[in-house]
Amino acid sequence: MALTKADMAEKLFEELGLNKREAKELVEMFFEEIRGALENGRQVKLSGFGNFNLRDKGERPGRNPKTGEEIPITARRVVTFHPGQKLKARVEAYAGTQEQ
Amino acid sequence: MTKSELIDILSQHQKHLTYKDVEFAMKTMIEQMAQTLASGDRIEIRGFGSFSLHYRPPRLGRNPKTGDSVPLSGKYVPHFKPGKELRDRVNSSIGKVEIREA
């Protein structure tokens, strides 16, 4: 089962004794602050986890896969995630018996 | 933005929580996320994105000093796919704000 915001709030409720509403708010705010920083052009570094970086990509030629018609892909700004050494090492140790 | 700045901001918003509480909450959230990936599970946060593992098959690497080839075993690496809200909000800032270091 995938980890969701509800699971994260539940953990804060259990481990910090926050009430459920506070826990839910804190989890929501955590992700919202990261989104807000990125939206303002600010890259985000979470030590022990990884960095969220921004990249501007120029316009490039594209194609409508259905019709084959040529349409330019407009310039855009994208988020990229770079896992930190610690996270990479922990994930690498996972033997991976089940397929994702 | 760094983890400590994020703790500052969250504790300003949550006046009833101390800095220490927010620091512990943040540590708990990040650890839970890392632990989820380390045990091979996905993370799905609507409007933010999903984290999953991608498999990298075994390959022959090289020792850059000696040039000897070294067999490298297959491994998993974390992968992030931004969600629609994050994608749209970030994309709408192109040309309006400069990209700044964390």
Image: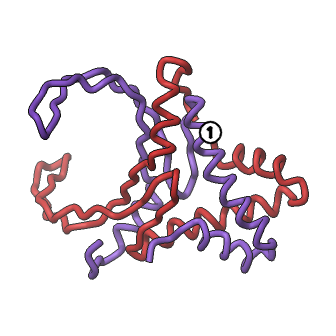
Chain colours: A purple, B red
Q: Which quadrant of the rendered structure holds the C terminus of chain B? A: top right
Camera-nearest residue between A53 and A92: A53
* Quarter of image, res A55: top left
Q: Position of residue B58 (x, y in %)?
A: 15, 65
Residue at 50 percent of width and 46 percent of height: A51
Mark 1: amino acid = Gly
Label 1 chain ID: A
Residue at 43 percent of width and 68 percent of height: B37
Q: Position of residue B83 (x, y in %)?
A: 45, 49
Q: Position of residue B45 (x, y in %)?
A: 52, 59
Q: Which residue sits furthest front?
A: A67
* A24 to A75, vertically: above or below: below
Camera-nearest residue between B2 and B45: B45
- On the picture, is A57 further left or further right than A17? left
- On the picture, is A47 further left or further right than A64? right
* B102 to A86, vertically: above or below: above
Residue at 57 percent of width and 52 percent of height: A47
For label 1, the residue is A36
